[in-house]
Image (cartoon, helix red, strand yellow):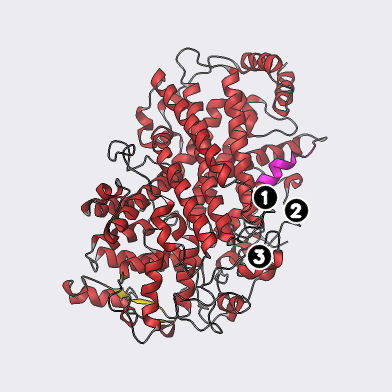
Amino acid sequence: MEDASSRASALIDMPSSNSHLSTSRATRGGRHSRRVGIDNSEKQDLQPTVVEAGSESQNSTEEPASVVPTHEAIRPESLLGTSQSWSPVISLPDHVPSDTAQESPRSSNPAVSQNGSQAPSATMVVTYSHFRFLTISNLHNISASDVNYLESQGCLHVPMRPVLDDFVEQYFLHVHPMVPIIDEGNFWDMYAQNLTDKAERSLDTVSLVLFQAMLFSSCTLGYATLRQARAEFYRRAKLLYELHAESDHLPLAQASILLMLWYPPLHMALVPCQTWLSRAVQHARYLDADGVAARPDASTKGQGSLRRLWWCCIIADRIMSLSARCRPLISHSTFNFKSSTALQASDLQDEVYRSSVYNPASKKSLNCLLEVSTDFMVMLTDVLEITYPLRDLSVAKQNIDVEESIRIAKCESAMNRWFSHASMTFPPFEQPNSTTEKKPTLHKSVGLHIGILYIYYYHSRIALQHCKLSSYLRSATDQMGEPTALLTIRDNLQDAVSSMSQLFSNLNRLRLVRWLPVSAIGCMAIPLALSVVTAKLEAANATSTPNHSPGTGSEKHSLIAFTEALSSFYPQYDDVELIKAAVRQAADQVETVSQAHGLWAPNLSWTEILLNDPSSYLRIVLLIDICINKGRVADDQDLPEWLLCRDKVNSPDAFLDTLQETTLQGFSPTFGGLILSQIAELGE
């Protein structure tokens, strides 16, 4: 087996994940692109590729061979913490699917730099003015020294074709569907201007700052590492923005939304996503986009663009709040959601037959999914207000009031109603082409975007259950609360974590997980940590109990799913380092908690920590949330005072007696109940 250093080296010195897109696309079939006049024998990459359900061969031709490292890159033992060795009973099996077998040599693509410190050569880029559709509105008004600096930093350069085509395709496949800041059909018309001798001068143009942000959000080519590529394109767009090369508020707002996807390395304390969101909202409000967005009858093209812009600000705001654990910027106090009509499929109807990456059936499905997703984002307005008040932890109330309990109950009911409606049209665990009915075949990426939506949903469910747990612990009437309430929280958390695991497992199997946005990393942090906590307990039992039996298959399945996903994210996103640090901290803490309560029993999992010592469980997950929110490893000083000072009014034995009595009266003897009885026996 490879040592840790060789695995880490393999992660850093890896080919780009799209390094052979051009060669793989030569084998594809498909209609000629009418939007972009590309010769069909040379370029078919902008066509929607359809996949029959269950066909592995077609899946492999649609998706370029992945070069994401296998689970060897980030093994679960690296997340267990510093004081515990890995137990062989939960080591990953050899049969886990991997894309490494299809990996192509880095030298196979001349666009890929052979030196990790070098960007693509000058022959692979061209000045932006080479393309008719690109423009900068304010370049003539900034100083000559600033223009020269932008030129020297590559900010005025863009990749040449056909590399540029790959960037654009990936943007419209994986970024645009759920954050449609621009009109896709109009873009393809503009993009085609450089491919015809008689360009239509009446067509619109794209601001270079927006286009550089689009390249950043979809970059996978031309650099030795994906992280380096993301950092370089982010820097270019950021410099264009900060040196005022663009003065039009619309592209500045659009670019700001895309630049929210940047998360810096762990050593950089400040996370700029909230800054970019504030800038996007400021530009949008300058254009009165929030006023236009409230009206569904946008009569002009400009009004339609502003309506898109504002609702994309709301979508980005909610995604940032979920992934970064912060309160939303656009709330009921700053925008009237009740009197406004959310973004609908009809707002994007013009794109259905004008896409060069999706067929009409796929585009219609994605537009409907966007409408369902926007409804979800609006519903999250109330949920996020109560689940992530992390900035107010130092002044958090010791006790809860009736109003808070009512708000939590209303949020839970709203989430259940949304899921019941959404799952009828878009089942979370059913692939779009898996039905036997004869329907138009959908692009494989439709399933990716369905998965992203439900990752957000289950993550928000987990956050809401943790909010309920906090209220449970701060209950003024009975500081230990009702055991049945704690069991309900446990069951809801188990369901959400298990569902999240299934989503990532499906995306791993379909080789789509590497196309997930950076926000997915923050959403998987808690489920990953809980799986690692269970592995920590399992490893300790393996060394302390001679006749120890392996844990449940579902727990091992979850751990495999999440670590496989983390390995896929590692080459792309710096945010992985922060998540790994937070998970290791949770793994280190669980040993202290378990020893304090004697939680050493066969098949033990995180749920027993929740049931036996809910305040310690909340401390573990809250430290993870604070770590992600602040961009650094958190400590006890970041926790609310009421949690640190909370005395155990009821002893563990008394609580277990009450809990077991309740279980006997109203619950079947589940796995958790068996563990509780064994813990009680150990205390006698």
The residue shown at (28%, 53%) is: 279
Q: Is residue 517 visible?
A: no
Given residues 623 and 69, the one toward you in this image is 69
Residue 224, relative to residue 409: is it above or below? below
Residue that carries the numbered disc 3 in the rendered image: 59
The N terminus: image quadrant? bottom right
Res. 545 mark: none
**In-image side of 55 versus 241 (left or right):** right
C-alpha span from label 2 to label 3: 24 Å
Residue that carries the numbered disc 1 in the rendered image: 560
Residue that carries the numbered disc 2 in the rendered image: 93
Say which quarter of the image contains residue 250.
bottom left
Residue kind at label 2, given as amino acid type:
Pro
Q: Is residue 484 visible?
A: yes
Residue stretch rendered in magenta on the structure = 549-558
Say which quarter of the image contains residue 61.
bottom right
Return the disc, 2 or 1, that comes first in the chain's sequence. 2
Residue kind at label 3, given as amino acid type:
Asn
Q: Secondary structure at mark 3?
A: helix
**In-image side of 112 versus 335 (left or right):** right
Does 557 appear in magenta?
yes
